[in-house]
Amino acid sequence: MNTTNTPIQACLFDLDGVLVDTAKYHFLAWKRLADELGFEFTENDNERLKGVSRMASLDILLEVGNVQLDDATKIALAEKKNNWYVEYISTMDESEILPGALTFLQELKQYGIKVALGSASKNAMTILNNAHLVPYFDAIIDGTKTSYAKPDPEVFILGAEAVQVSPEHCVVFEDAEAGIEAALRAGMRSIGIGSTNTLTQAEYVVSSLEEMSVEKLQRIMSTK
């Protein structure tokens, strides 16, 4: 699909690590679980969990610890981890919004560009409500509305359908390789949030949304 000079009509955002700083709470909860199981889980290990579903994340964690468990035990452990995570995020507020995110969301609304969330998190509404970000979204697709985890493109396809914009007119903002791959598989443009060393498939990479504006977005997307 030739997307050169295609105007952007919708922006789809991952949540953790893109709009809000909740990735640290995921790490704390997973590390707490690993400690309980008797092995070390590092921040480097945690990078593999970005953009991945809860059960798939647990499988990676158990692989790190070389631990094999039956399905019932795994479900119980995933629930325990999530309960810890919910405890951590229950006290968060607007201060957890990452630099530039709110300003960029406000500008997108001013320009009439549709805004959708595309997150694997089943706790997205709790986070968005606590950070007072809900009014900025035209559609919210989270882990309660999807059947497949990234890099499957389902979450972004559903987001585009919800805001009634075709994929070639959408750009995805992601901090995880799995999310960038999902955007590509959905036929969408992509901007990585983080490092060019890890987000190798992203069309363009910025360190944070502080570097973004609508003018820059349209310029990037029209010259790629």
Image (tube, grey):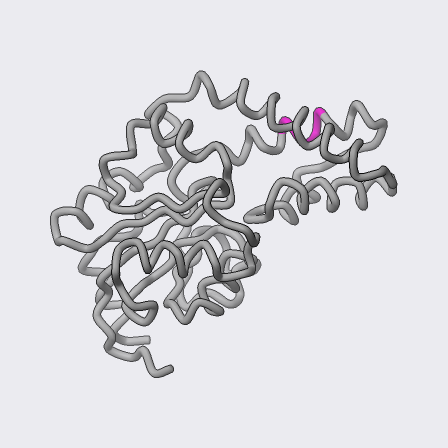
Question: Residue 70: horizontal and vertical position, in percent?
Answer: 84, 38
Question: Residue 72: horizontal and vertical position, in percent?
Answer: 78, 34
Query: Which segment is the magenta one?
Result: 28-32
Quarter in which the N terminus is drawn? bottom left
User: Please, is residue 185 above or below residue 191 in the view?
Assistant: below
Question: Residue 24: horizontal and vertical position, in percent?
Answer: 55, 31
Give the left or right position of residue 131, taking residue 73 as reference. left
Give the left or right position of residue 28, taking residue 14 as reference. right
Residue 68 or residue 161, whichever sits in front: 161
Please give the name of the residue rendered at 30% of the width and 46% of the height, measured from the top-left corner: 139
Residue 42 or residue 55, whichever sits in front: 55
Question: Residue 213: horizontal and vertical position, in percent?
Answer: 22, 53
Q: Quadrant of residue 223?
A: bottom left
User: Please, is residue 163 above or below residue 224 in the view?
Assistant: above
Please give the name of the residue rendered at 29% of the width and 27% of the height, measured from the top-left corner: 132
Q: Farthest residue in the bottom direction?
A: 2
Q: Main secondary structure of the magenta part?
A: helix
Residue 204 or residue 117, whichever sits in front: 117
User: Please, is residue 198 above or below residue 143 in the view?
Assistant: below
Q: Is residue 31 magenta?
A: yes
Please give the name of the residue rendered at 46% of the width and 19% of the height, measured from the top-left corner: 90
Residue 184 or residue 142, whichever sits in front: 142
Q: Is residue 190 magenta?
A: no
Please give the name of the residue rendered at 79% of the width and 23% of the height, measured from the top-left corner: 36
Give the left or right position of residue 221, taking residue 61 as reference. left
Give the left or right position of residue 216, taking residue 49 as reference. left
User: Please, is residue 41 above or below residue 182 in the view?
Assistant: above
